[in-house]
Image (spheres, rainbow, N blue to C red):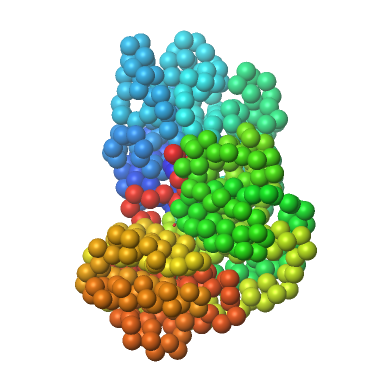
């Protein structure tokens, strides 16, 4: 989850790295730092807990003219949040930044201490610096020291290493994101844990595979070279033109990125429809139409998993193909049973979620064909899957995923249509357009939702309940509220409350009941059980229903007509707004909620 940015260029390296770190703020962090070669050729280190402006305050008055800089935003895994444990870590001649976890750090550190090395922090990352420093002191070149040290550390990690005497930056990774970039005009070279940091800075981007040593020099003839650990040139990297421009990442008239991204959804639905039915996505669908899986093993985490539950309902009802939808963090340790004709389906916004990638690797090992529904093009997931269906959500800055959920579900619906073999996209396009329109209407009438949020945000606890295709929406609604308002909320199958959880219902508990046209009577009787126990009732349900209005303390009327299987997405946006405004009244950091990271790249 940490952010890494490295740069070699012409005297502007520190500014470039600071701009890159700013772009990675959305991932969530607790401290930041930079290490750069100063005017005297020495490595000089500045790092500080808190937000980037704390680091910038430290740099006031410092001569920042430098042609080599590495920077880091830390999301603490080993070692408390303090200045010393922030990155970069520097001894006098070598600095390193790290994203990931060194699982055998304790034993390696113990061996190094027995060799007389001392450590300034209690992080696992500094252990890697110790290994490299120790090997260089034994007379090894920096390259060999890094290669040898990397073999000794276990776990998923990406390291970027800088050395005082050599004007190069090395980088290597295993099971963690790493991307390099080259600017053709200036020969500037960059390395990062997130392609977004390089956007607008480089013309070509490179995705090295695991255990490839990236050597960045910024020199005219060999600005960037890839090696195997034994020093031989490596071909194990993907190179592509930097396509995406710096999308307007400002919040505009919105107070938070999350609210901006909620409002982007109608336009993104139309863009997705155009991409898959009229644009480059058509070719992808031709491949899907030829697939005849006997079963689909669907894996994801968090919001992406809840999107997967909606997609499972689509595929099972439309294609009659059994779908096993699992949390990747469970699937990967379950020793699952595979059949040759299985299809692995992985859903992820970032394409870097460690558990999802581990589940993917399980499928790859068992020679199961793999598909992704992924947002970040060039992400690890997108490079490892046999076929990608990009969800075209654009950069999602808010840590709480909103537009990506909608695009994941709709891309999954398109996939279900294609799996028919002889799809009829016309009818689906009509529903997509209707959904986009309905969401525009909903987003233009947020006052009612805002008012309800103001009346309920301080209650003790929340149940989100739903049946059938609305059960995943109840799960997702509860997650949103937990994430951004820090209140306890549980998503529950409406029919399950009476099997125990109803014991929790009292006048301090709010039940957000999601009621669609299907199974309506059943859903209403569940709400009556809660009402009888003085629970506070919020109903998101069909409009013009006096019975629902009478039954609830707060009623959000929704127009489901014609949406059919797309209704869950429509209700979900109402939930996104409800959670957003409740968090706003609570005054939490909505875009960067405490303890959370945008991409969970550690297990
Ligand atoms: C969603 O709001 C959360 N930020 C989190 O649950 C997220 O969906 C999960 O970590 C999966 O991330 P991914 O889609 O990038 O794989």
Residue 213 x/y as whole percent: 59, 27
Figure quadrant of residue 567: bottom right
Residue 596 appears anywhere in the view: yes
Residue 270 x/y as whole percent: 64, 71
Q: Residue at x 52, y 20 (%)?
A: 151
Q: Residue at x 21, y 72 (%)?
A: 507
Residue 590 appears anywhere in the view: no
Figure quadrant of residue 174: top right
Residue 28 x/y as whole percent: 40, 50
Q: Nearer the viewer, residue 274 or 36?
A: 274
Q: Quadrant of the C terminus?
A: top left
Q: Nearer the viewer, residue 31 or 334?
A: 334
Determine whether, in the image, residue 239 is placed left or right of residue 483.
right
Q: Residue at x 61, y 28 (%)?
A: 212
Determine whether, in the image, residue 162 is placed left or right of residue 74.
right
Q: Quadrant of the N terminus?
A: top left
Residue 91 x/y as whole percent: 38, 24
Q: Nearer the viewer, residue 190 or 391?
A: 391
Q: Residue at x 70, y 30 (%)?
A: 235
Judge whether 497 appears above or below 71 on screen: below
Q: How many marks?
A: 0
């Amino acid at each position: 989850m940490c952010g890494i940015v490295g740069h070699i260029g012409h005297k502007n390296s520190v500014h470039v790295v600071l701009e890159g770190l700013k772009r990675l703020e959305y991932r969530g962090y607790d401290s930041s730092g930079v290490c750069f070669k100063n005017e005297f050729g020495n490595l000089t280190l500045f790092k500080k807990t808190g937000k980037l402006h704390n680091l910038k305050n430290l740099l006031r008055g410092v001569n920042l003219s430098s042609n080599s800089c590495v920077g880091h935003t830390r999301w603490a895994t080993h070692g408390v949040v303090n200045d010393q444990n922030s990155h970069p870590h520097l001894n006098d001649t070598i600095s390193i930044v790290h994203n990931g976890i060194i699982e055998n750090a304790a034993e390696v550190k113990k061996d190094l201490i027995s060799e007389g090395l001392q450590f300034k922090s209690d992080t696992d990352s500094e252990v890697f610096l110790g290994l490299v420093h120790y090997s260089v002191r034994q007379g090894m070149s920096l390259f060999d020291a890094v290669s040898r040290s990397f073999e000794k550390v276990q776990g998923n990690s990406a390291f970027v290493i800088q050395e005082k005497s050599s004007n190069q930056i090395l980088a290597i990774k295993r099971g963690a994101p790493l991307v390099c970039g080259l600017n053709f005009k200036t020969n500037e070279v960059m390395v990062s844990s997130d392609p977004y940091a390089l956007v607008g800075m480089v013309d070509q981007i490179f995705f090295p595979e695991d255990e490839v040593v990236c050597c960045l020099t910024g020199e005219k003839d060999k600005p960037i070279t890839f090696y195997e650990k034994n020093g031989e040139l490596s071909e194990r990297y993907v190179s592509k033109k930097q396509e995406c421009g710096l999308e307007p990442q400002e919040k505009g008239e919105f107070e938070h990125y999350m609210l901006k991204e909620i409002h982007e959804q109608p336009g993104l639905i139309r863009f997705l429809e155009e991409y898959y039915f009229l644009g480059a996505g058509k070719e992808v669908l031709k491949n899907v139409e030829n697939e005849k899986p006997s079963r689909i093993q669907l894996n994801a985490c968090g919001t992406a998993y809840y999107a997967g539950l909606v997609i499972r309902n689509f595929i099972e009802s439309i294609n009659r193909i059994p779908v096993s939808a699992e949390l990747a963090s469970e699937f990967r340790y379950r020793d699952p049973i595979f059949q040759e004709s299985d299809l692995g389906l992985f859903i992820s916004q970032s394409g870097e979620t460690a558990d999802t990638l581990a589940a993917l690797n399980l499928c790859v090992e068992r020679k199961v064909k793999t598909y992704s529904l992924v947002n970040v093009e060039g992400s690890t997931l997108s490079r490892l899957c046999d076929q990608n269906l990009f969800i075209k959500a654009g950069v999602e800055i808010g840590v709480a995923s909103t537009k990506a959920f909608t695009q994941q579900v709709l891309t999954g619906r398109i996939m279900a249509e294609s799996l028919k073999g002889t799809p009829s996209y016309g009818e689906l396009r009509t529903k997509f357009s209707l959904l986009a329109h309905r969401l525009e209407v909903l987003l233009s009438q947020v006052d009612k939702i805002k008012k309800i949020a103001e009346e309920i945000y301080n209650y003790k606890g929340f149940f989100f309940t739903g049946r059938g295709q609305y059960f995943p929406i109840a799960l997702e609604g509860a997650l949103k509220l937990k994430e951004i308002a820090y209140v306890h909320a549980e998503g529950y199958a409406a029919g399950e409350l009476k099997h125990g959880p109803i014991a929790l219902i009292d006048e301090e508990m709010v039940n957000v009941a999601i009621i669609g046209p299907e199974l309506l009577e059943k859903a209403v009787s569940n709400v009556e059980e809660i009402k009888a126990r003085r629970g506070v009732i919020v109903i998101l349900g069909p409009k013009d229903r006096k019975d629902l209005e009478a039954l609830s303390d707060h009623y959000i009327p929704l127009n489901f007509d014609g949406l059919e299987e797309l209704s869950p997405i429509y209700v979900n946006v109402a939930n996104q707004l409800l959670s957003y405004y409740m968090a706003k009244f609570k005054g939490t950091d909505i875009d960067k909620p405490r303890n959370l990271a945008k991409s969970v790249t550690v297990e």
